[in-house]
Amino acid sequence: MASKTKSSPKYKRILLKLSGEAMMGKENFGIDPDFIFYLAEEIKSAYKTGVEVAIVVGGGNIFRGVAGSKQGIDRTTADYMGMLATIFNGMALQDAIERIGVATRLQTAFEIKEIAEPFIRKRAIRHLEKGRIVIAGGGTGLPFITTDTAAAMRALEINCEAIFKGTGVDGVYDKDPRKNNNVKKFDTLSLEEAFRCDDINIMDNSAIDLCRANKINVVVFDIYKKGNLKKAVLGQKVGTLIK
């Protein structure tokens, strides 16, 4: 096998986890079309390195199940509403990526055959092998489970080598840098440390524990900085590597 060049990806297959809030861009609610197209270009730039890309998007920009339940909606119902929100986001992202020439498949955890395929593990893997981007919507299809945990589960199911968590912060800190001045940034961190430290809240503990038990790395980086996703895919020093 030929050795990798500087422009070759460090990973063969990754799962990109985006929060629903990332879809808002400069808006206060919903979907910012301009920012969606920015995300699509960033994803295409990384994809062009040869890495296989799966994506899980949250739904907090439209509806968050926990918040809905606090307002009096039955928690199970609220969580299903949140799952639908992730599918809205997946549809918007699929449209943007396909508009710039990259084949994409949206697969959902429960059947909505008019707009998406059902998530079938082997079919998802086959799409990736054929050079298509796969967006997994609808979380796990079960209430009481976050999209972080859904991302970890999907990454394991389709044999991803790493989860890339795109955030608004340039890595992992010992405290929230948006609320504290005296903070320490980690270039690398172990999954054990991320699991045990209550001040590190990059992913929920269920997701971190799945990654820890199955030895899958997590890369946390600033998705708002142009070129960061491609740099991270190439193995350049971007954000924090949790391993």
Image (tube, grey):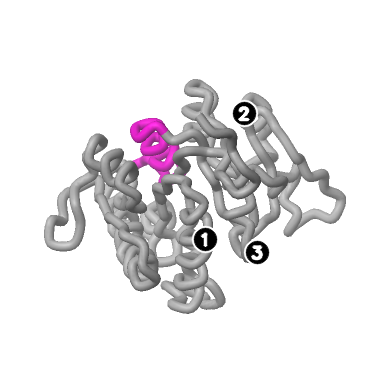
Asked whether 151 falls inside the magenta stretch, the response is yes
Magenta span covers which residues?
144-159
Q: Nearer the viewer, residue 89 or 65?
A: 89
Vertical arrangement, residue 189 with respect to residue 80, above or below? above
Task: Report helix, strand or loop for mark 3.
Answer: loop
Q: Main secondary structure of the magenta part?
A: helix
Q: Position of residue 128 (x, y in %)?
A: 33, 44
Label 3: few (<14), some (14–19) or many (≥20) C-alpha neighbours in 10 Å: few
Classify the position of the C terminus by image quarter. Answer: top right
The residue at 66%/35% (across/down) is 198
The residue at 86%/50% (across/down) is 182
Disc 1 from disc 3: Cα separation: 13 Å
Q: Quadrant of residue 97?
A: bottom left
What mark, if any, has residue 45 been given in the picture?
1
The residue identified by callout 3 is: 225
The residue at 58%/54% (across/down) is 230
Disc 2 from disc 1: Cα separation: 28 Å
